[in-house]
Image: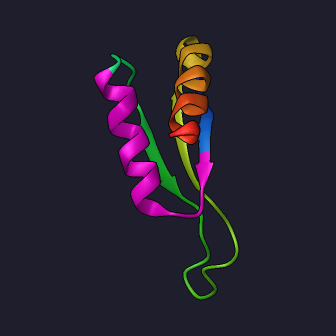
Amino acid sequence: MEKGWVIAYKTRLEYQAEIFKEVLRDNGIAAQVINKMDSTYKSFGDIEVYVPDTHILKAKMLAQEFEQG
C-alpha cells in the first residue's frame, strides 16, 4: 500500500469489506480494499480496508458503527 494509507477495518468476508468501502466513500473518505487471504486456505489472512491517514479517526468511528449494525 502507498505511504500515508492505514488500515481502518479488517474482515474475513469480502462483501463486508466492499460494503464498508462504500460507507467510507459515502462519507467522503477514499478507500482501498486489499485482499490478503491465502488463495488456497481461506482460513488464513484478512481482507483489509485502507484509508488515508488523515481520515483514520473518522474511518475508525464509522467502522465501529458499521460493526454494531
| Whether residue 19 is situated above or below residue 51 in the rendered picture | below
| Whether residue 20 is situated above or below residue 36 in the rendered picture | above
Q: Work out which residue is located at the far front of the displayed protein and give it.
A: 69
- Residue located 58% across and 38% down the image: 68
**In x, y percent, where is residue 63?**
56, 32
Q: Is residue 3 visible?
A: no
Of 5 and 26, the residue lying toward us: 26
**In x, y percent, where is residue 53?**
59, 18
Write down the region rendered in magenta.
10-26
On the picture, is 31 further left or further right than 13?
Answer: left
| Whether residue 57 is situated above or below residue 12 in the rendered picture | above
- Residue located 32% across and 27% down the image: 25
- The chosen color scheme is rainbow
Residue 51 part of the magenta-drawn span: no
**In x, y percent, where is residue 59?**
54, 23
- Residue located 68% across and 66% down the image: 45
The quarter of the picture where residue 20 lies is: top left
The quarter of the picture where residue 8 lies is: top right
